[in-house]
């Protein structure tokens, strides 16, 4: 006997609802969409297929494999951090401290640092399971040290050609530009003409030039002038990195530096800035030591300390830097961030160390401790040396982008500057919502389309059909940076969803485990 299976029509219709092709892979519904261009937000749905935004508008009658109800919260492009310290990306490839801020793209190689063998390094990064997108600049200090070591001299003609070739190799391998750290060894030993010669190589390959300028304190005006000269002579877009007026003697000087930027741009140059939203900087304790004393490396520094006259000069130089360049008599403004020799001091101040040594907390007594720290591997410091009015003034400038200058961090490891956890939410919460230094649209533009345009990535940093689906959903009323100088290991509040290349990477303020990040290179180079 033959049997025939009879399936009710109602069941087939029910099954069809789940087997028919969906219109989109993902729909974000009911979002208050900020397009990243500074325009007023619009209530829209966003349709995404694979890694692209394919439709904006009312998608009520459309279906998707995955749906997110934004509940009218802010939907923005992913934030682009053009000045990040990601040397530890191999150890922390998820980049959670950045992703939880809403960052979708990190650019490493800042301040003249980064790999000295650029092609080999970034090839290895491309093999990592990345949480966010990653790109790089080529660092002048790394290139110079590979050719000259840490010698305090000009390169020979042949050595300069070698340096230019290393920059060209990096640019050909996808670097977005050249960065310098002209306050750091060995970049500080270079003359302007050397930097111009290397910047011209970046120009030839369509890159930009960013600089931790030669001096952010007493020599600030001259250092900004040097950067503008490089912009002119190398015919290149320049970025004044983490622009600031450092030290009480220079508070208010941003008024003049911003006028210099305006004049340069009015003259046809392209001068931009980036900034993190804090009144404290972070760099090595070596910044307090005259650069000439550190030429040739640690052993040479120790040798100079054995010479009575040289040691006397070093001590006087440190004392001058403490009092006139950095903190005056307020040694509590010198805070230890990472101190391998004395980890118990991490998070503490120079006053704490002096008291531990039963010394009066004076700049003169701090000098020898600074020397001891440098002899024993150095320390990373937080310098509380900027003024809030300068921060506000710089942030308002139409050429200023937001960038963290932060290091990839994870809870319990060292004592990072809070910018590593809170830069982008701090701008949105404190400076846009609370202080109203910026409108929310302006703040978002400074962390999305402006940095994307600097990088030449016109398909990122904005919410438009055809653009890459790097997106953030956050609550404008609740977004808040939680990291403090006392307790930095705290993730921000209010970031609800982060989408990287069309994939949900953070949802309900928790990581999904998706690693959708990619190595991003200039000129769409495929590695």
Image: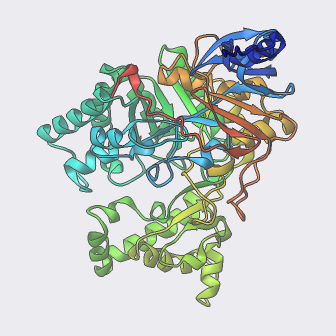
Residue at x 55%, y 41% (from the top left corner)? 131
Residue 403 image-quadrant placement = top right
Count of marks placed on residues: 0
Indicate the position of residue 121 as horizontal and vertical percent values: 32, 44
In screen coordinates, is 319 left or right of 207? right
Would you say residue 192 is visible in this rendering? Answer: yes
Residue at x 39%, y 70% (from the top left corner)? 314
Given residues 154 and 328, the one toward you in this image is: 154
Residue at x 33%, y 29% (from the top left corner)? 527
Indicate the position of residue 222 as horizontal and vertical percent values: 47, 39
Would you say residue 139 is visible in this rendering? Answer: no
Indicate the position of residue 19 as horizontal and vertical percent values: 69, 17
In screen coordinates, is 430 left or right of 48? right
Residue 274 image-quadrant placement = top right
In screen coordinates, is 138 left or right of 385? left
- Judge whether 46 appears above or below 432 on screen: above
Which residue extends farthest bottom? 358
- Judge whether 33 appears above or below 332 on screen: above
Given residues 206 and 192, the one toward you in this image is: 206
Given residues 475 and 158, the one toward you in this image is: 475
In screen coordinates, is 74 left or right of 292? right
Colour scheme shown: rainbow
Which residue extends farthest left? 158
Indicate the position of residue 362 as horizontal and vertical percent values: 62, 78
State which quarter of the image contains the N terminus: top right
- Judge whether 256 appears above or below 376 on screen: above
Residue at x 33%, y 77% (from the top left corner)? 305
């Amino acid at each position: 006997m033959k049997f025939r299976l009879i399936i009710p029509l109602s069941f087939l219709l029910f099954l069809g609802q789940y087997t028919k092709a969906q219109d989109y892979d993902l729909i974000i519904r009911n979002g208050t969409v900020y397009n990243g261009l500074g325009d007023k937000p619009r209530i829209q749905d966003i349709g995404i297929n694979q890694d692209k935004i394919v439709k904006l508008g009312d998608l009520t009658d459309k279906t998707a494999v995955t749906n997110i109800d934004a509940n009218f919260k802010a939907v923005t492009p992913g934030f682009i951090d053009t000045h990040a310290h990601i040397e530890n990306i191999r150890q922390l490839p998820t980049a959670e401290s950045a992703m939880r801020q809403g960052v979708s793209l990190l650019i490493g190689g800042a301040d003249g640092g980064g790999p000295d063998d650029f092609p080999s390094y970034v090839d290895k990064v491309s093999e990592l399971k990345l949480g966010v997108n990653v790109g790089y600049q080529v660092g002048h200090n790394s290139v110079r040290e590979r050719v000259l070591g840490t010698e305090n001299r000009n390169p020979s003609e042949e050595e300069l050609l070698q340096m230019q070739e290393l920059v060209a190799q990096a640019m050909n391998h996808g670097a977005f530009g050249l960065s310098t750290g002209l306050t750091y060894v060995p970049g500080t030993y270079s003359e302007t003409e050397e930097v111009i010669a290397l910047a011209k190589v970046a120009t030839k390959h369509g890159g930009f030039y960013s600089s931790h300028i030669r001096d952010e304190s007493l020599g600030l005006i001259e250092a900004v002038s040097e950067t503008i000269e490089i912009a002119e002579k190398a015919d290149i877009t320049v970025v004044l990195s983490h622009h600031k007026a450092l030290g009480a003697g220079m508070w208010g000087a941003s008024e003049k530096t911003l006028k210099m930027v305006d004049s340069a741009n009015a003259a046809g140059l392209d001068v931009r800035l980036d900034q993190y939203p804090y009144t404290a900087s972070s760099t090595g304790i070596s910044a307090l030591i005259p650069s000439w004393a550190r030429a040739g490396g640690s052993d040479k520094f120790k040798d100079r300390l054995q010479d009575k006259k040289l040691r006397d000069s070093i001590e006087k130089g440190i004392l001058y830097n403490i009092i006139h360049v950095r903190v005056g008599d307020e040694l509590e403004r010198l805070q230890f961030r990472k101190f391998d020799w004395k980890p118990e001091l991490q998070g503490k101040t120079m006053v704490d160390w002096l008291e531990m040594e039963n010394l009066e907390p004076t700049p003169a007594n701090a000098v020898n401790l600074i020397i001891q720290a440098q002899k024993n591997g150095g320390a990373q410091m937080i310098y509380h040396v900027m003024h809030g009015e300068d921060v506000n003034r710089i942030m308002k400038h139409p050429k200023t982008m937001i960038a963290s200058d932060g290091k990839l961090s994870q809870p319990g490891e060292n004592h990072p500057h809070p910018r590593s956890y809170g830069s982008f939410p701090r701008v949105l919460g404190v400076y846009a919502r609370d202080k109203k230094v910026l409108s929310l649209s302006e703040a978002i533009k400074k962390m999305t389309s402006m940095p994307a345009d600097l990088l030449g990535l016109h398909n990122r940093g904005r919410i438009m059909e055809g653009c890459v689906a790097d997106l953030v959903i956050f609550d404008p009323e609740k977004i808040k940076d939680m990291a403090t100088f006392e307790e930095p290991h705290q993730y921000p509040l209010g970031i609800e969803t982060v989408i990287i290349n069309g994939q949900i990477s953070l949802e309900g303020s928790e990581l999904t485990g998706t690693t959708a990040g990619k190595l991003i290179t200039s000129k769409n180079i495929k590695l």
